[in-house]
Image (tube, helix red, strand yellow):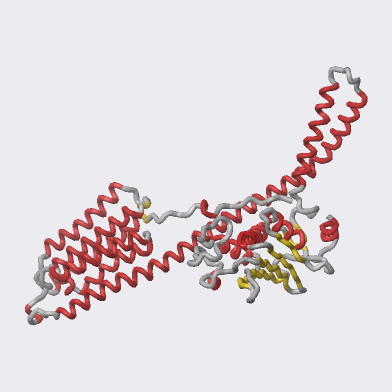
Amino acid sequence: MSTRPTIDLDRLPMPRRNVRLDTLVRLRWLSVIGQTTAVLVVYLGLEFDFPIWPCLAVIALSAWLNIALRIRFQQARRLEPSRAAWLLAFDVAQLAVLMYLTGGLDNPFSFFFLGPVLLSATALPARLTIALGLFAIICVTLLIFFHEPLPWSEEYGPMPVLPDTYMLGVWFSIVLAIFFISVYAWQISEESRQFVNALAATELVLAREQHVTQLDGLAAAAAHALGTPLSTISVIARELEREIDPKSPHAEDVKLLREQAQRCRDILSKLNELQTEGAPFDQMPLRTLLQEVAEPHRHFGINVEVKIPATEPSPVAARNPAILYGLGNLVENAVDFARERVDITADWTADTVTVVIADDGPGFAPEVIGRIGEPYVRSRRLRRMYATGDTGMGLGFFIAKTLLERSGAKLTFVNRNFPERGAVVSIRWPRESFNFAAASELEQKAANA
């Protein structure tokens, strides 16, 4: 029986958080158009008096930066997070200067400070978002004390003077909005990003497992196909060795031919072990499936026992790499945390097939038991981490759960009832969705093996 290779989830490629330059450039053009429109409407339409030319110069600086970026870089270029953060910091500074020229926090457009920070929260790492948020808060704070008068016209009466308490409330509302909205946007985008990354890791694991399964089948088929001609060569070589004179110059060559033919047969017999206990390459009994899953984990000082009813023939299923990897991952996790034993118990009815994996370890940590199967779940107490070198990221269970659910299974994760200790994972399939069939000669061969 073959031992399936372990995939190190820590080394799976994860996409970097690079931002498309074209995205930032397009958003800045929208900002330039909006700011220019607002300035012209207030100055020409409402006839408010304020320093329009410095305002237009600040807006033109933002437009010039966009043009320079278009000339210097390709449209499809992706920026490193640090460079993207500098561009967003420029937007914050440009808006701060514009607000300084048009009334500071008295200007109702001061809430546009949320824009760059919100964009950073959805696309950049948390440390850069925090730095950008602090920079925006510093700019907002300075605008309380340093700013030009709010644009106004005598036609609308005397300029309103807002009390300091109200201005403090405006400042406080902007700061809270920057904090809470950014944290919320970052949390949502981070969960989405982690889920996408975990699904990509799942697809990679499944592709590798399918490749390994195909190699297993090809190796077993080659061993079976080459067995007959090698047997013929061995028979002929033995006959020639008996007939030829030991003193003949070809005697050593014939002996070497027989030995190498025997060596080839030995190699092919090992390859033939990839075939699961005599089962066809595309089907295997449930009994054999569980034995194959358990076999690689029986050499770590933990008693791994497969329990299947002996009175009934076990169902026969199509050989499914997703199920093999998913069950193997759960068994590996159980072995990692078991003290002495892991029990793999199977049961079935006319409608369902159930596999239960139980260990006698510490069990699932209470703070994560309700979130098992989500990607990148960490346990504070680290009572029970996740399988396959995952260092607490939770990808092991996520991949196993995703692959098994794709086959139609439903998984439940519980701890044993006190005073017993240990974790229990139950996997249940509707019989038809798992492609089970009645066991016949296939089951009999596996039982006799």
At 9% from the left and 76% from the top, the residue drawn is 153
Q: Looking at the image, which is closer to me, 248 or 282? A: 248
Residue 30 picture location, percent across and down: 28, 63
Q: Quadrant of residue 407?
A: bottom right
Residue 431 picture location, percent across and down: 73, 70
Q: Quadrant of residue 323?
A: bottom right
At 58% from the left and 63% from the top, the residue drawn is 397
Instruction: Residue 440: tell me if it is visible.
Output: yes
At 15% from the left and 59% from the top, the residue drawn is 57
Farthest bottom residue in view? 157
Instruction: Residue 322: tell me if it is visible.
Output: no
Residue 32 picture location, percent across and down: 24, 62
Q: Quadrant of residue 97?
A: bottom left
* In the rendered image, the vertical position of residue 445 relative to residue 138, given as above or below: above
* In the rendered image, the vertical position of residue 33 relative to residue 251, given as above or below: below
At 17% from the left and 67% from the top, the residue drawn is 142
* In the rendered image, the vertical position of residue 396 relative to residue 181, given as above or below: above
Residue 111 picture location, percent across and down: 25, 71
* Left or right of 266 in this view: 413: left
* Left or right of 421 in this view: 197: left
Farthest right residue in view? 243
